[in-house]
Amino acid sequence: MLDSARSWVEGWTVSRRTPKPVDVPWGLRIAVGLPDQAVRHVLLDTDADTDAETARRLIDSVTEPVTWVKAFLEPDVMEPWFSSAWEPTDPGFLMAVDLRPALVRAPDGYSLTTETTETAEDVTYVRVLAPGGELAARGQIALTDAACVFDQIVTETAHQRLGLGTVVMGTLTNAAVESGVTAGLLGATVQGRALYETLGWKVLGPLTGFIHQPFAR
């Protein structure tokens, strides 16, 4: 799972256009630089016993607000490491799939657009437009040397339960397959997991996060 975890982090940084992750003793550090996420630390060791001491040293050293710490561990394992200055994020999961061509058909009246950036690190964006032209669903993929990372899969509330998430995932999958990629990775929410499992994705492990919010209490 370590290789998959690293590939997911690398693909996430490509998708989000952040600086590349930097190797540190606890895993990877990303200087995200956003108002709601200044820095992201990802712990790569999934052995809670060996990871706890290193993680606590990291956590105790953090002073910058909206610093994130994520790990592939269950929430109840990580929670004792954090003080009241930290808040948990919504639970998540690292998921993977062997990519195969998908049959894609948008509902009547909806249309698809696909765009790939022309840079050294390609990101492909898929959007589903409603009959009135407004955005109904979207998603994107980033290619790394080892895998394709799916990201930002969203269906707008007014257009849910129409199968648009499946349309987005299928279109992105076909774009990845056309690029010669055979493995897919993503970080899923609880709600997203249900959709991805119907499409053949498997859970590799939990994805738990905490945010440093010293002024929130």
Image: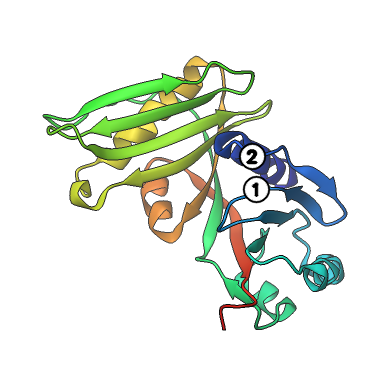
- Tell me the crowding category of disc 2: few under 14, some 14 to 19, or many 20 or more residues within 10 angstroms, Cα based: some
Asked if the residue at tag 2 contacts the one at tag 1, i.e. Cβ–Cβ closer than 8 Å, the answer is yes
Q: Nearer the viewer, residue 34 or 186?
A: 34
Specify which label sits upstream in the sequence, 1 or 2: 2
Q: Residue at the location (74% across, 46% down)?
A: 2
Asked whether, in this view, residue 144 is left or right of residue 103, the answer is: right
Q: What is the number of the mark on residue 90? A: none
Q: Which residue is mark 2?
A: 18
Question: 103 or 116, which lies in front?
Answer: 116
Under circle 2, the secondary element is loop
Residue 185 on image: x %, y %: 56, 40
- Residue plotted at (57% across, 72% down): 88
Q: Amino acid at mark 2?
A: Thr
Vertically, is 142 above or below 34? above
Callout 1: few (<14), some (14-19), or many (20+) C-alpha neighbours within 10 Å? many
> So how many labels did they put on this image?
2
Q: Vertical placement of 77 versus 185: above or below?
A: below
- Residue drawn at x 61%, y 34% is 14
Give me the C-alpha separation between circle 1 and circle 2. Answer: 6 Å
Q: Which element is circle 1 on?
A: loop
Amino acid of disc 1 = Val
Q: Is residue 39 visible?
A: yes
| Above or below for 4 versus 114 | below
Tell me where residue 122 appears, x and y as whole percent: 56, 22
Q: Is residue 105 visible?
A: no
Left or right? Give the position of 53 relative to 101. Answer: right
Q: Identify residue for label 1.
A: 32
Residue 217 placed where, x, y %? 57, 84
Residue in the image at 48% along x and 15% along y: 178
